[in-house]
Image (cartoon, rainbow, N blue to C red):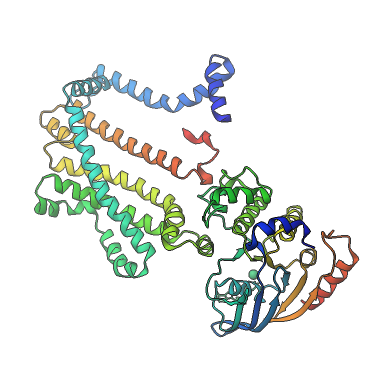
Amino acid sequence: MAQVALSSLAADPASAGLSLSLAGVKKSFGAVPVLQGFHLEVPASQFVAVVGRSGGGKSTLMRLIAGLEQPSGGRLTIGGQPVNGLHPDLRLLFQEARLVPWQTVLDNVGIARGPDWRARAEATLADVGLAGRGQEWPSVLSGGQKQRVALARALVGRPGVLLLDEPFGALDALTRLEMHRLLEGLWRERRFTTILITHDVAEAVALADRVIVLKNGETALDITIDIERPRRELADPRAVDLQRQILEAV
Amino acid sequence: MAWSAVVSEAREEAVRPSRIRPLLASFAPWIVPLVLLLLWEAAARFGLVTARLMPAPSTVALAGWKALLDGTLVHHTLISTQRALVGLVIGGGLGFLLGLLNGLWKPAETLLDSTLQMLRNIPHLALIPLVILWFGIDETAKIFLVAIGVFFPLYINTFHGVRTVDPQVIEMARVYGLDRAALIRRIILPGALPSILVGLRYSLGLMWLTLIVAETISANAGIGYMTMNAREFFMTDVVLLGIILYALLGKLADLATRLLERRLLRWHPAYQANHGDRN
Ligand SMILES: Nc1ncnc2c1ncn2[C@@H]1O[C@H](COP(=O)(O)OP(=O)(O)O)[C@@H](O)[C@H]1O
Ligand SMILES: [Mg+2]
């Protein structure tokens, strides 16, 4: 299934995904519990979508995995290693692109620096369809282009895990479809483990191998999306049926 | 690129009637000052104002020319400029550094900020008698006053700038592994820069204002000395020359910050594309 990727994978072993494991993870803010003993096993390179009502703890879950918040209890491992603090092989994408306005697009993509960062940043910009736009300021880009830059910035270091928190929520429908194709293509090529948080059930079914419904801090549904890729989002009756199942669980 | 093409085209075809309009527009702001100058000149020539109290612009220009030839103009201007800049570097530099320190490091803010806010309420020109008692009327007194004048705008705006850098961008930078030094250099300082430049602009205004007052009270060189000296000999033209010099230096400082802003804030939407707002 990863035929396309084989050549580039062989050249770059770091591009394989990392497994994720959450065992009994708890998080509360003051007296308010958000997650109470949450379990999740994600094999390497799986694409998981998490859906749930607003305020259900999806962003908190993501920030916990990213090491931006400390869990109040439980165990969290990435690639078999316990998580403490930020993980260098993990990258995030938020709804806002969070580009640094006073740095060029290229400097933004290469923010983590490292050897050869310019060349790598330029190549990754080309991968997200923004070849040659490196010298522009973020403020001249459209919302979709900014999110592409943010995606390039996340992927330039070949992360093992990519977390996306409603990354396309602010985009118009057409741009969102473009971004879906881009993300799916990049994921199929690079096989980073992906967690996509979304409130768009169609988006979840279109992109993920597996959809989890998060409700009251617990898993209310965990289903596999067994539709071959690349997927044509609107047409498939199986997709419609899965969407209905998910909506019932939310 | 497109802009420069437009400019050269405009130069080449400036004679064509359709191109006269923009030329006129760029000349328009100068019409009123020129008319006023002419009226003033006429009023002085025809004795409508006492030439001793309000000499004609041509007389002032002549005084300026003479002072330029005998070197006094350059001499006094250089001395004033030097005082202003030394005061700016000391006071502004301190304001900037303290603003940075208190903005970046909470304990320093707790310790220092309320004291500084209290001192800020003292009008610095009120210190003149004290400063004369401390330093006499030598250079230190004037530089000290300028330094205090420029300190607070830079302190407050640097502090504010550092504190208001988008926390989401800072969090993002942390996720990408920037250490504290890189965070300050690449994220916080550039993010605070628009505010710092506002502070610099205020500081430059206060710098000249303070210097004018300080030099007028006590000096044996500098533009203020030149005008006060001229007053004693009733050389009103030189007094006016001094005032115009101060105005020009102030304008120059303002221009310098504008250039600095345009260069350093190229990324900012407010400084992009709209080349049209140059007038
Ligand atoms: N830093 C925080 N401090 C206090 N409460 C928080 C914080 N972050 C999130 N919460 C609360 O946790 C709950 C879950 O929020 P969140 O994870 O953002 O949900 P979602 O992303 O699913 O909309 C909400 O009730 C929210 O108010
Ligand atoms: Mg959220």
Q: In the image, is residue B124 above or below residue A66?
A: above
Q: Is residue B206 left or right of residue A84?
A: left
Where residue A191 sits in the image (x, y, percent)? Answer: 71, 63
**Is residue B182 shown above or below A217?**
above
Q: Residue at x 42, y 51 (%)?
A: B193
Observer able to see residue B279: yes
Q: Residue at x 46, y 56 (%)?
A: B187
Q: Position of residue B10 (x, y in %)?
A: 55, 21
Nearest the camera: B16 or A118?
A118
Q: Is residue B94 above or below residue B23?
A: below
Taking depth in this image into account, of A94 and B205 the one nearest to the observer is: A94
Q: Quadrant of residue A158?
A: bottom right
Residue B109 location in percent, x, y? 34, 67
Q: Residue furthest front?
A: A10
Total count of labels:
0
> In the rendered image, which quarter contains the N terminus of chain B?
top right
Q: Nearer the viewer, residue B172 or A161?
A: A161
Q: How far across and down, in percent of the image, does residue B49 sit? A: 24, 24
Ligand 2: give its quadrant. Answer: bottom right
Left-right relation of A115 to B44: right
Rendering quarter of residue A192: bottom right
Q: Do we see residue A94 in this rendering? A: no
Q: Identify the residue at image location x=21%, y=34%.
A: B78
Q: Residue at x 33, y 38 (%)?
A: B253
- Residue furthest to the top in view is B15
The reply, left or right, for residue B78 in relation to residue B31 is left
